[in-house]
Amino acid sequence: MADRHLEPDSPELRARWGSFAFNAAWDTKAKAAIARYPAGRQRSAVMALLDYAQRQVGEETQTQGWLPIPVMEYVAKYLDMPIIRVVEVASFYTMYNLVPVGRFHVQVCGTTPCMLRGSDDIMAACKARGMHKGHTTDDGMWTLTEVECMGNCASAPMVQINDDNFEDLTADRLNTVLDALAKGESPKAGTQEPGRHTVEPLGGPTTLTAMVSANHDYRKEW
Amino acid sequence: MPKVTVDGIELEVPQGATVLQACELAGKEIPRFCYHERLSIAGNCRMCLVEVAPGPPKPQASCALPAAEGQVIKTDSPMVKRAREGVMEFLLINHPLDCPICDQGGECDLQDQSVAYGRGSSRFHEHKRAVTEKYMGPLIKTTMTRCIQCTRCVRFSEEIAGVDEIGALYRGENMQITTYLEKAATHELSANVIDLCPVGALTSGPYAFEARPWELKKTLSIDVSDALGSNVRLDSRGREVLRILPRVNDDVNEEWLSDKGRYQVDGLMKRRLDRPYVRRDGKLVPASWDEAFAAVASVNPGKSVAVIAGDLVDCETMFAAKALAGALGSSLLEGRQTGLSYDCSNLAAVNFNSGLAGIEDADALLIVGSHVRWEAPVLNPRLRKAAMRGAKVYVVGPHWDATYPVTNLGNDLAVLGKLPKDADEVFKSAQRPALIIGGAGLGKGALDACLALAEKYKLVRATDSGAWNGFNALHMAASRMGGLMLGYAQTGGIADLVAAKPKLVLSLGADEVDYTKFAGSTVVYIGHHGDKGAHAADVVLPGAAFTEKPGTYVNTEGRVQLADKAVFAPGDAREDWTVLRALADAMGVSVGFDSFDELRAAMAKAVPALGREGLADYGALPKGKAGASGVIDAYPIKDFYLTNPIARASETMQRCSAELLHGESFAEAAE
């Protein structure tokens, strides 16, 4: 996070993004987001609109998307609010990318539970594939970021790639996922542990065991 | 009215007061950084922690906690002491220890409060955060590493100035205060964030590394850059005024000051007239005082004398000149240099009757020909306050960015005869309707029509909360109201002076006059800057600038205020009244005063209102005459930063004008 900065304003940036506008699909969604708030409070929709803008940029660039300065200015104009207030929001939340990212934005969780469960191996596996923290690979496929807790501690370690979480990773499992993504496939999101459904305890439930097959009234046993 | 107990003192506090305000009412000092009386409450510095019962058993941020019935507040308990020490320790974690090279040193809230409430030593051994330099324009010097993120500057520009240009980017430890894309702050009150900044993050650019606060002599004075009479403090060292800071006066300028009032100060050391000059063979050549007086006396004008007062002069100077002209037998006095000729027979019609503070209460406002942001920058936040409270604002004249919602009624003054239907209804139903006529409106002769409007919509009325007079004239010259009170107004304006073809024209620092019309006259310029007036003069008598003489000024609401003398005028220059007094001797007449006190006494006798500080009473509004015609195609001020000779001589103002108004870019010098 410490590396976050705005992509500098340049004539090239203006030339590429100066004419940005929502396409019909995102425009509909943007209007719907604004309609959620009372009239005159349209700026409440800034977070949704920044997200839509980032996604449209992603579609146009075949990446996860990011927010060039002219795009933020477009959002500010769209919502009739001062541009500095838009930039404040965009720079606060790390889900908004302020600089270009690759096709897949690999966000490796490095917080304590993931670290204890082997996030260092995950990070090493990413680096072995040529990724560097905070950088995009030369082929434009991968951007690697280390992030703080994503709330998947029960299935640590995990990475978030674009909109999906991949959990219960080992270096091998991560490589499988990344290979699949590289081939253009859509690997199964969520836990990568064979036999595990979501974040239920490994090796079967340890509490409420009587409830596994049928409903059971525990109240008499208290 | 909740009753609270602060450190054992029981007191009643106003409804809606915060715990911090309650503590202050009890006479307790509460340290704070982010809290500011005139800004919204942010509650992010945590320095104002106190212990409050009933409540959670932990310190509470008093600035954001409403005082409630029966609260027991402790500001001196061990818990509060430890809490303050802790907060201070955190604030200092990332604050550099560069006080010796910081311009805020000596007047720094963080410095003072860490001495008063800090631990005394640091336990932090890690690296401090550093923040890249930000650019905020020619006036504000930034050292953002020192920033403690109180967000006062952000709130000021959003709430008071109404220009959202400063923001806090990123988050947590990486939070940075900046303008969008590091563009210069461009509004007329931008430098007030320097006063608001509790640390040395935002300091004064032009004043950088000039002096320490304890070296400076502080003199109370009045700003002359516009007609508001903002209360200022002149900080001087030796013979130089180094900076001008606003003083708190809730009736006039609250605690703000326009950038021009603050930063034209360096113009006081440039292009000064420090010796008399006499025109010989078409060229001004240096002369002694005796030669200069002899040159004036040799004109031998008899009664054929006219006096033109400039925009910056004080009442004493104008009175002295009036006395001199009177002794010579003339009453040709005029102060409206650019040819305005509105009727001044009743000064209530050209006064800001609602008062600068009173205008905040207006609920309908019509601005006729006034670019308020440039003509009276400190007034605009008050109009903004009124607008934010729901007042409808209408503007007649070319568009300017008001920072609050306005409805433009076009440039044609004919609209004053019959306001559009919705405006008409708003004014009919308003409780406190108000009208402001500015320079362009007065110049196009809209005064009568505005007075008619005042009558039509009952701008003068009794309301539940007292008498209301919503008829306001907004002047632009510090000397205007004083001049009008002293009779510096001819029926036809300056054209009357031209028509009289005076042999001798006394110009009291009048630099905006078209002197080609006085081609046959001998022009004697008594002023302080080698500006347009001195160029056109036949004799130049060096006078004192507003910092170099005591004086009385009357602002646009008729408030008589006194200014003190901070420094001596440079070289042979003298206080203006002494020049006029000596001139009287040279011309062989008596003006009836030999000292400044006698002059003041004579002035107070002639115009009693000038002898009393405070609002002058001009009586009731005259009746107007409906119907105005003409189109306001421009406002009188073409360049906000260069409106008077001091500002024009100021390098800072020249740079502001070039950079902020004319878009020149000044690359930062590489260091």
Image: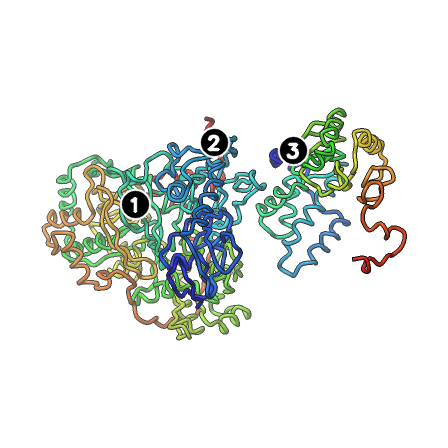
The disc label shown at residue B668, or none:
2
Residue B580: x and y in percent read 17, 49
The colour style of the image is rainbow
Mark 1: amino acid: Leu
Q: Say which residue appears at 75% left-offset and 39% top-offset.
A: A162
x, y percentage for residue A197? 85, 43
Hey, which quadrant is residue A139 in on the image? top right
Say few, some or many: other residues with alpha carbon within 10 Å of mark 3 (under 14 / 14 to 19 / 20 or more): few
Q: Is residue B94 left or right of residue A152?
A: left
Q: Residue at label 1? A: B234
Q: Quadrant of the C terminus of chain B?
A: top left
Q: Based on the displayed image, in which of its 4 quarters is residue B622 positioned?
A: bottom left
Secondary structure at badge 1 equals strand
Relative to B33, say whether A171 is above or below.
above
Q: CA distance from mark 2 to mark 3?
A: 23 Å
Q: Is residue A80 left or right of residue B236?
A: right
Q: Is residue B349 above or below residue B301?
A: below
Q: Secondary structure at mark 3?
A: helix
Is B409 in front, or is B414?
B409
Which of the 4 image quarters holds residue B646?
top left
In the rendered image, residue B72, in percent from the top left (x then y), is placed at: 44, 60
Residues beneath discs 2 and 3 located on the same chain: no
Q: Is residue B593 visible?
A: yes
The subunit letter for the residue under badge 2 reads B
Could you tell whether B519 is left or right of B402 in the image? left
Residue A38 appears at what percent x and percent y?
65, 61
Could you tell me how far apart the alpha carbons at marks 1 and 2 are, in whole angstroms? 29 Å
Q: Under tag 2, what secondary structure?
A: loop
Amino acid under label 3?
A: Glu
Residue picked out by circle 3: A12
| Residue B651 seen in the current view | no
